[in-house]
Image (cartoon, grey):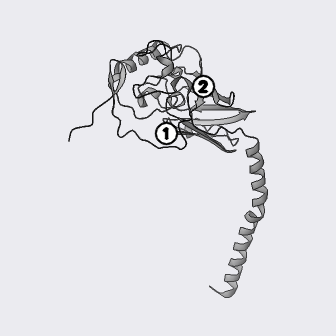
Amino acid sequence: MTARAFALLATAALAVGAFPAAAQPEAAARRVEAFAQLPYWPGYWVAEDQAGTTITGLAPVATASTGSSFSVPIMPLRATDAPWNAEGRRRWDEVRQSAGGRKATGWGYPMMMGSATPLRFLITPEETIIINFYNEARYIYTDGRSMPAEDDMWPTTYGTSIGHWEGDTLVIETVMVTTPSDFFHGSPPFSEEARYVERIRLDGPDRLTLEMTVTDPVTLTQPWSVQAAWVRDPGFDRQITLDWTNDRTGNEDGLNTIELAPVE
């Protein structure tokens, strides 16, 4: 390379690098301002009706009157009361028959939003990430983009989520969720055509609320709406990532138990 060519290349490189450097303070200031407009939901959140759950799978609120069995409805996202049509009821019965002998692959969506596993909400101007202790994550894009075209999506465990803020309420639309009960036996058997709309907001200093409406022409006779909530779990000061490879949860008489370690 000649000295002249090298000089021209160096000058071009400096020119290209100069613009981002000059724009950085302005861009940073805009982002700081954008952050200031967003809610802040720090800490670890657990489903309100699942707080204090032990290995038995029974939360204190569910056993308050009996001490050993479910005395109040819990985990409303299971959709026990959904307006199932004939196909939905067929799927529901099929899942319930096989649930006791199945291992979990994870919580999946929508059940990760109403489980006993703590959640974190990481909020930025461009997206909100919801992650649980099993390293399951949802990415809700809030940068103004539209939902991708249908032929540019395919069903996945957590679907595709686009969101926006209405004041302090995060509104999320999620589509293309793989049949939830195929992933986790406790999930509702909605089809891949289901559309989920969530509204999440802070209700007091230590409580988040959720309103969800699901429409599914395959399994429901009409839209189904449900409410849930989370409370701060003070028992955690850091996120401990787990996995499902050592799942020793058994099932006996409808309750979870701990299976013995395999004998080698």
Residue 103, image x, y percentages: 35, 31
How far apart are the two marked residues, 1 and 2, measured between alpha carbons? 18 Å
Q: Circle 2 is placed at which residue position?
A: 229
**Side of 133 where 130 appears, left or right:** right
Residue 71: give its label. none
Front in this rendered view, residue 204 or 227 = 204
The quarter in which the N terminus is drawn is bottom right
Kindly identify the residue that appears in the image at 70 percent across and 82 percent down.
7
Front in this rendered view, residue 251 or 100 = 251
The quarter in which the C terminus is drawn is top left
**Side of 69 where 29 appears, left or right:** right
- Mark 1 closeness class: few <14, some 14–19, many ≥20 residues within 10 Å: some
Q: Are marks 1 and 2 in contact (CB under 8 Å)?
A: no
- Mark 2 closeness class: few <14, some 14–19, many ≥20 residues within 10 Å: many
Mark 1 or mark 2, which has the lower sequence index? Answer: 1
Amino acid type at image mark 1: Phe
Kindly identify the residue that appears in the image at 51 percent across and 31 percent down.
112
Amino acid type at image mark 2: Ala
Residue 123, image x, y percentages: 65, 42
Residue 59, image x, y percentages: 47, 23
- How many marks do you count on the picture? 2
Q: Circle 1 is placed at which residue position?
A: 133
* Residue extending furthest toward the left: 264
Name the secondary structure under disc 1. Answer: loop
The relative height of residue 215 versus residue 18 in the rendered view (above or below) is above
Name the secondary structure under disc 2. Answer: strand
